[in-house]
Image (spheres, rainbow, N blue to C red):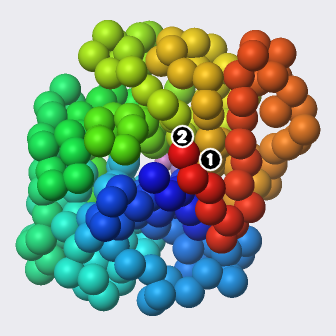
Amino acid sequence: MKITFYGHACFGITIGDTNIIFDPFISPNENAQHIDVNSIKADYIFLSHGHADHVADALTIAKNNNATIVSNYEIVSWYGAVHNYGNGHPMNHGGSWTFNFGKVKYVNAIHSSVLPDGTYGGNPGGFVFETSQGNFYFAGDTALTMDMKLIPMFTTLDFAILPIGDNFTMGVAEAVVAADFIDCDTIIGMHFDTFGYIMLDHEAAKSAFAQKDKKLTLLGIGDSMSL
Ligand code: NI
Ligand code: MN
């Protein structure tokens, strides 16, 4: 499984020959100006919630690739009704669906969700993936929540992508506990350094995880890793 960081909460994950993009916010991200949105390949675009810093480039990438937008019912419906983009797969909390690359569950996140034009964006969520190449959790924007303890009751995670930037989401101290709750020691950080509110001390964050025998990886924008 190849994982590429496109800045903020945007990742590309390749599972077999399927390209998946999460929460694309690239063209408005000053730190990601070296990424060409139009070069991104996607079969699916997963959106955790409706905030602009998670959906800004979704329609562009979707149209470029005829990609399927997967999100909650409200967000998928909005792309159909407002943008006439009907290639979507709606989900809601607790539900799973088996796609060609594996099984995905839409799980709870503690946050808020409104679409860029003010439309109600449903409840925010995260995604748990079970695939033949490994299992992972993309948390979206969320606080630390006891609901995370439900995830390892059903899925053994190989890695998790967690927000760590604080202010709008959980910070490092909570993310370390979240890693315990989900029973996963391999964490990739997201939602840091994009705005003044979420600047991160990278070395302090890594050492907070290391003290609990966990590994935090902070990818540079445009960098990839394999897991
Ligand atoms: Ni948000
Ligand atoms: Mn956000």
Determine crowd level at label 2: few under 14, some 14-19, many 20+ residues with C-alpha closer than 10 A: many
Of badges 2 and 1, nearer the viewer stands 2
Indicate which disc residue 161 carries: 2
Badge 1 amino acid:
Met
Query: Is residue 217 something that shows in the picture?
Result: yes
Left or right: where does residue 6 sit relative to residue 133? right
Indicate which disc residue 76 carries: none
Determine crowd level at label 1: few under 14, some 14-19, many 20+ residues with C-alpha closer than 10 A: many
Q: Quadrant of the C terminus?
A: top right
Where is mark 1, residue-wise?
190
Disc 2 from disc 1: Cα separation: 7 Å
Residue closer to the observer: 144 or 184 = 184
Mark 1 vs ligand 2: CB below 8 Å:
no
- Provide the secondary structure element on which disc 2 rests: strand
Residue drawn at x 39%, y 21% is 156
* Residue 15 position within the rendered picture, expressed as x and y whole percent measured from the top left: 36, 56
- Provide the secondary structure element on which disc 1 rests: strand
Badge 2 amino acid:
Ile
Q: Quadrant of residue 76?
A: bottom left
* Residue 26 position within the rendered picture, expressed as x and y whole percent measured from the top left: 56, 74
**Tally of numbered tags:** 2
Q: Relative to 118, say whether 190 is above or below.
A: above
Query: Is residue 195 something that shows in the picture?
Result: no
Earlier in the chain: of badge 2 and badge 1, it is 2
Residue drawn at x 59%, y 66% is 6
Left or right: where does residue 112 sit relative to residue 215? left
The reply to whether the C-beta atoms of the residues labelled 2 and 1 are less than 8 Å apart is yes
Q: Relative to 144, say whether 160 is above or below.
A: below
Residue closer to the observer: 159 or 11 = 159
* Residue 40 position within the rendered picture, expressed as x and y whole percent measured from the top left: 45, 80
Residue drawn at x 12%, y 41% is 97
Residue drawn at x 45%, y 52% is 1
